[in-house]
Amino acid sequence: MSRYELRTARSVYVVAEAPEGLVLEHWGDPARVPERPSVRRASFETAADVAPLEYAAAGTRYTQTSELLVEGPVDGARLQLRSVTHADGSLRAELADDDTGIEVVLHWRTSLEHDVVERWARIRSTRHEVALTRAFTAGWNVPVGPGARVTQLVGTWSREFTPAEVDLPAGQLRLGSRQGVTSHEYSPVVALRSRADPGEAYGVALAWSGSWRMQVDAVPFRDVVRVSAGVDDESTVITLGPGDGYETPRMLGVWSADGAAGLANAWHDYQRGTLARPGDRPVVYNSWYATGFDVRVEHQLALADVAAGIGAEVFVVDDGWFAGRTSDRAGLGDWHVDPEKFPDGLKPLVAGVLERGMRFGLWVEPEAVNPDSDLYRAHPEWVYRAGDRPLTTMRNQYVLDLGRPEVEAWAAAMLRRLLTEHPISYLKWDMNRAVTDGGRPGGPHGREWTIAHTRAYYRLMRLLRDEFPHVTVEACAGGGGRIDNAVLALSDVVWPSDETGPRGRLAIQHGFLSAYPPSVMSSWVTDEPDRLDTAPASLEFRFVVAMAGVLGIGSDLLAWDTATSDRARELVALYRELRPVIHAGDVTRLGEPGEAHYAVQYTAGSRVVVLVWRRPGDGPVRVRLAGLEPGAQYRFGEEVLHGAALRVGGLTVPFALAPDCDVVVLDRLA
Ligand code: GLA
């Protein structure tokens, strides 16, 4: 039996040829690769019923849920292995069903630079027109069974990335979105641990930003829990004519010997090293919370004065700068500088920002349109609609059918014009509603709208990278409505939530950091009171929360007194000094944000940075630091402390910065 080993930095993924097809033989610790695969089965089960297939199609003997559902002259596909090509870090397998002419090519890819296994598939119909009612990317046989503890990141607007752990002894857990965006409700990533021995952990993610579905199938009494995912099988049907093919989005799987903490860092290593572009993420001042739609040049420049003074590196004008945009009821789609607000064009504002030593940034929402806009009046046929049903608005807007080539071309031209006409070097790309009317009446591929839309979105994001590489791109969707590994590969930072109240934000960031890195986690200091998180917190507390990722400021700076601005300047300078460690370091979340105190530790090279928050009235705080060398000594201010003592006894936090938070910096002595 041939077996194929794919190595990652710290793990191995072993696939073997069995009579039933390609099966997973081992995934995890390279020191524990079994001699032979062991699949438990009774005499009345065939091996094909239970084999941990890497990809299953309905139509085979395999009895569990399948990744591929085909409807055509003959339903289902009896996939047989045709050939396998294996090299270091890559595996390719061809499967085919001779009866129906369905062909599937499976791909695996790994690297010694990180721990992620990437997988995707290409499906082709060679003979007939067929409908793929489910075309998932892959099946992952996660060896934690029977059953699993599954952690998901769930939420709603302003409450994204809340960890929710499910004990799944048996049964199926399905999560996903049919909103055309990743969604606020579920993130396409799960963590799995054994119910009996929760030491090691596996993560599985789908890198896709349109409608999606992920299924965790804890088949009773099996050693593996099967995770499959792909484009949503509830709202999407892919039609393939003879000779047509479809390539799935990628799925990513990762193993860590060190539980949830190890998993988070394994994701971060991959996202930082493989997905992200190199370069610093700048300190942003965004005037949205200070001005709303009331954008005026003099007022923006007055804000820019203070922003530059406290150390902001980019000044971003959010919503409200374009024609007719006096509220969220009009103007979306008309991406021309508003002649009333800017009688001399954008130039005086941009020049003023650049003169103050900052870069200039702008907000756009290219996928949406207000009914009250010139664009909609000219092209009412460009928006999604479900048959003749009346259109519905959310936030007074429709969604453009970006999958139409003419709409994509319009968006590309608009972006090129904006970025060529003005020296913009930061773009915040927003998407403020779910697609509820997805469809294209009369279009033969109408039920593939989310695929067409998402691919067009990716092409446009790639256009920004390729043609305007100096532009930092922030991805946003009414907060964290479209964050996933595909977006991370095409943007520089993401906006995890519209919630900026510091305790609410801390909870969101805690969940975010379990699957995504601090180097992309945009976070702003804003004024009190927050809409949801209304208890007061010190300015320092709010700054330290935002420092945990990519610091930004969204306050009304003209309402700050000099003492506040001076303090802000010190805090921005502190952040800029520590930014390399915060963005590149290993992250350990110490405790839970709802507890009396909570900390996040970043370790890079010889430097350790710990951000600590505590509730008012909480007593002395000792934080047990993670991953320090027990034999090493660490300098902390005037003191020298032992690694072993910091790990076991912990560090007494002085709260030198403020009574409710601190920033602790330790340097390992040579
Ligand atoms: C969304 C974003 C906000 C802001 C507004 C502007 O809600 O998440 O940050 O840009 O849109 O309308």
Image: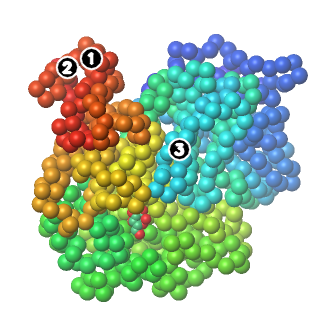
Image point (60%, 80%), residue name: 381
Amino acid found under the numbered disc labelled 1? Ala
**On the image, numbered disc 1 is attached to which residue?**
645
Per the image, label 1 sits on a secondary structure element best described as helix
Seen from the viewer's position, the closer of residues 217 and 450 is 217
Image point (25%, 13%), residue name: 631
Per the image, label 3 sits on a secondary structure element best described as strand
Sequence-wise first label, 1 or 3: 3
Question: Where 346 falls versus 606 (above or below)?
Answer: below
Asked where in the image residue 183 lies, by quadrant, the reply is: bottom right
- Residue 493, given in percent of the width and then of the height, sits at 37, 52
Distance from Cα at disc 2 to Cα at disc 1:
7 Å
Seen from the viewer's position, the closer of residues 87 and 250 is 250
Q: Is residue 623 left or right of residue 440?
A: left
- Residue 119, given in percent of the width and then of the height, sits at 58, 39
Image mark for residue 641: 2
Asked where in the image residue 289 lies, by quadrant, the reply is: bottom left
Can residue 128 be seen here? The reply is yes
Seen from the viewer's position, the closer of residues 51 and 566 is 566
**On the image, numbered disc 3 is attached to which residue?**
153
- Number of marks: 3
- Residue 623, given in percent of the width and then of the height, sits at 31, 28
Name, please, the residue furthest toward the right.
44
Q: Is residue 241 left or right of residue 11?
A: right
Distance from Cα at disc 1 to Cα at disc 3:
34 Å
Image point (27%, 62%), residue name: 555
Image point (26%, 25%), residue name: 651
Amino acid found under the numbered disc labelled 3? Leu
Q: Is residue 629 left or right of residue 213?
A: left
Sequence-wise first label, 2 or 3: 3
The answer to whether the residue labelled 2 contacts the one labelled 1, judged by CB atoms less than 8 Å apart, is yes
> Split into 4 quadrants, where in the image is the C terminus?
top left
